[in-house]
Image (tube, helix red, strand yellow):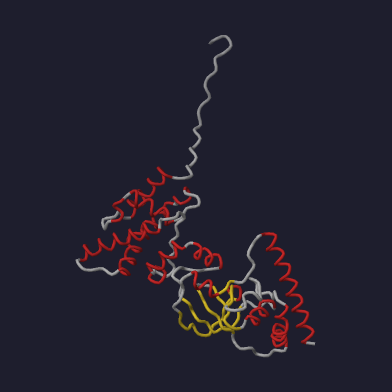
Amino acid sequence: MASQTAHLDYERARRKAFRRRLLSWFTRQDNALLAFDDVRSGLHAQAQHEGGLREVPIDQIVGSVGRYRDFDRAFLPRQVKTRDRWESVDRAQIEGTELPPVELYKIGDTYFVKDGNHRVSVARERGQKFIDAHVTEVLAPAPVSNVEDLLEWMRNQEALHFHEVTRISELRPGARIELTLPGQYEKLLEHIRTHQWYLGIEQKREVSWSEAVASWYDRVYMPTVGAIRRTGVLRDFPHRTEADLYLWITEHHWYLHQQAMPKGQELEKVVTEYAQEYAERKPLLPLIRRRPAKLPSVDGA
């Protein structure tokens, strides 16, 4: 009975995989699992450490070390050769046999299967939300939340270089600095170097690069971003980011680089004035209600 059920489960999973493959072909969207070695290389992520045993959300498992051609992005089986192993795992699940935890690599908030691809596939097909896993964490220089992040950071090597050089994600977890125009990340690095120099003058000592990065983020970048958020000016710059505005504002008002930068309402005024002058989407002028002109009478009165 269990064998027959497992056979039907596999056939159903294969049909789903076929439909998804057709849909991805029509929509021109990639439906393949990500190859771990390609992602690790593309993200310059090498350092790793043991993360222990934990429950992992199955929908955050997006790739595989060696079986990325055997399953699609939803871990549905794409190859006939997966049948025997897939059905044996499914049969064990049906019979209540306890299976060992899978082994995963973790990059950001995404996971890649080192061992246990069929167990992940069966668990997902059977509607499981979580799976027990031994996790090895691989440290990436940039923050990664999902597949789109992975691919975007791999495409944007300038951004990746900035995060790699500054180690901002390590120094300030959760920091996300994104620019939309090419060639701008080098300007941010120059801002940090300038801030490092001012810090050395201020404190009369040599300031390390890591200390300068953290201080720049806390004392220069985030106060400006905070003013951008409080004033809501980002809405006047469609398709731009907070980091874009920070860069433009600080270059327009060069003194924001220095230690005596404006604070609080003064900084908000600087941000607002910049937006009023350079907004990409100009606010609509309010309609002025005018009294209708008095028309002359027929008799000229």
Judged left or right of residue 23, residue 155 is: left
Q: Position of residue 3 (x, y in %)?
A: 77, 86
Residue 281, given in percent of the width and then of the height, sits at 48, 44
In percent of width and height, residue 70 lies at 66, 76
Instruction: Decide: is 127 above or below 227.
Output: below
Is residue 142 rendered to the left or right of residue 54?
Answer: left
Residue 9 lies in quadrant:
bottom right
Question: Residue drawn 40% across and 59% down?
Answer: 185
Quarter of the picture containing the N terminus is: bottom right
* Quarter of the image where one finds residue 179: bottom left
| Coordinates of residue 81 in the picture (x, y in percent) | 71, 80
Nearest the viewer among 276 and 210 is: 210
Q: Nearer the viewer, residue 254 or 140?
A: 140
Please give left or right for residue 68 compared with residue 174 in the image: right
What residue is drawn where x is 70% and y is 67%?
21
Q: Residue furthest top?
A: 299
Q: How many marks?
A: 0
| Residue found 50% across the figure and 50% down from its top | 238
- Residue 177, quarter of picture: bottom left
